[in-house]
Amino acid sequence: MVSLGCPKALVDSERILTALRSDGYQLSGDYAGADVVIVNTCGFLDSAKAESLEAIGEAMAENGRVVVTGCMVNEAETIRQRFPDVLAVTGPQQYEAVVGAVKEAAPMPPQPFLDLVPARLELEGGLKLTPRHYGYLKISEGCNHRCSFCIIPSIRGDLMSRRPDAILREAEKLVAAGTRELLVISQDTSAYGRDLRHARFGKQEQRAHITDLARDLGSLGAWVRLHYIYPYAHVDELIPLMAERVVLPYLDIPFQHASPAVLKAMRRPGNEGLVLERIRNWRAAVPDIAIRSTFIAGFPGETEEDFQYLLDWLEEAQLDRVGCFAYEPVEGAVANALPGALPREVREERRDRFMAKAAGISARKLQAKIGRTLEVIVDEADGEGGATGRSKADAPEIDGHVLLRDAPGARPGDILRVTIEDADEFDLFGVPA
């Protein structure tokens, strides 16, 4: 399995592999040992599509028996023209089609003991591609927004929420198997349950609403981290849960920009003044809340004044964790037709200026943590006293680290109290308290 793209695609890969494993297939660690290679593609940006095509080409060259799935479904004809010998091309979430293609390409011989099993294992809570101590929990598919730079709705469709009792059942299995951090993901986490009209499900009558779901997940004893929160008004209801330590004091909100003109062109909410007020209120209620966001620099029509407005807004917002992308046109996106397209060098220069500003803010915020004692979850340990972990303000892969010394007994998944001794722009350095 070659899995590309975001954590949501990683969950799709886990479900495909769980289905195949329950049918008796094993996962190969290399091309040579595989009867079939599955490439789960990303199609969000043109650069991601290029990476996906490169991965398909490598799999074809190294193995030759390739099933393609994922978000490049809109490019199925391109894939087949470039690689006419691929075994199958399916879209995202089409688990059964992928499993069927694998079975056709590499039929499983009769297995008397396995064939006695009456039904496949549930796709929930099965094989994981993440370390044992943390796992992604996908609560919905699709998105109802129509941002001008995004083609996700055309790939994954409109919002489709999972039943809360099914989500909780999966979370319980993950925690029972050793997961100590649940990373809640979707395209629009705060919209969870809208398509279900926030109905109640299961014997416990759990309501399909992000606040209720977060509270229920927080009762399982693991860290609960919320990603991709769209800033609806009811997001304020999550803040008391953070103050009570039911879920982590961490909000991942993709603001994308601050200039009203650019936000309008992006088809995003444009009241940046209200956002700043809400951020102040969140910090008043939860002083240690970490706010992460992503932004796009160099959007079509963005003037230097618009970009300076964004920099000034960031200085006032003092966001804890920030990522920024230079705008890339995406085939099929409405933004491609907008006037005022900027040269690549301008887009990249603005991205670099934005990240320099963000790095300065991050450095000051981390310096303020020196001398404090924080809870840290260990991701890696060398067995000789060195270890790498994350605080409650850090999500895996996208945020900073806490680098530990004098921690010979640390093991992945341990949650330690750590005294912070030093900091740089993005990482903390500490020792077990």
Image (spheres, rainbow, N blue to C red):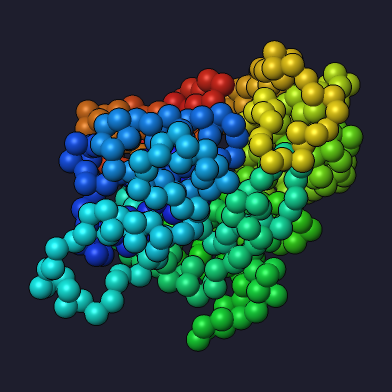
The answer to whether residue 157 shows anywhere in this view is yes
Q: Residue furthest bottom?
A: 203
Q: Residue at x 60, y 35 (%)?
A: 45
Q: Horizontally, is 232 left or right of 200 in the view?
A: right
The image shows residue 326, relative to residue 194, as above or below, that is above
* Quarter containing the C terminus: top left
Q: Residue at x 46, y 41 (%)?
A: 80
The answer to whether residue 310 shows anywhere in this view is no
- Of residue 87 and residue 351, the one placed in the foreground of this image is 87
Number of numbered tags placed on the structure image? 0
The image shows residue 202, relative to residue 412, as above or below, that is below
Whole-percent x, y for residue 356 in the image: 66, 18
Whole-percent x, y for residue 215 in the image: 57, 66
- Of residue 363 and residue 69, the one placed in the foreground of this image is 69
Q: Residue at x 26, y 64 (%)?
A: 22
- Dividing the picture into quadrants, the one containing residue 179 is bottom left
Whole-percent x, y for residue 394 in the image: 52, 39
Whole-percent x, y for residue 429 in the image: 44, 26
- Dividing the picture into quadrants, the one containing residue 296 is top right
- Of residue 121 and residue 215, the one placed in the foreground of this image is 121
* Quarter containing the N terminus: top left
- Of residue 137 and residue 426, the one placed in the foreground of this image is 137
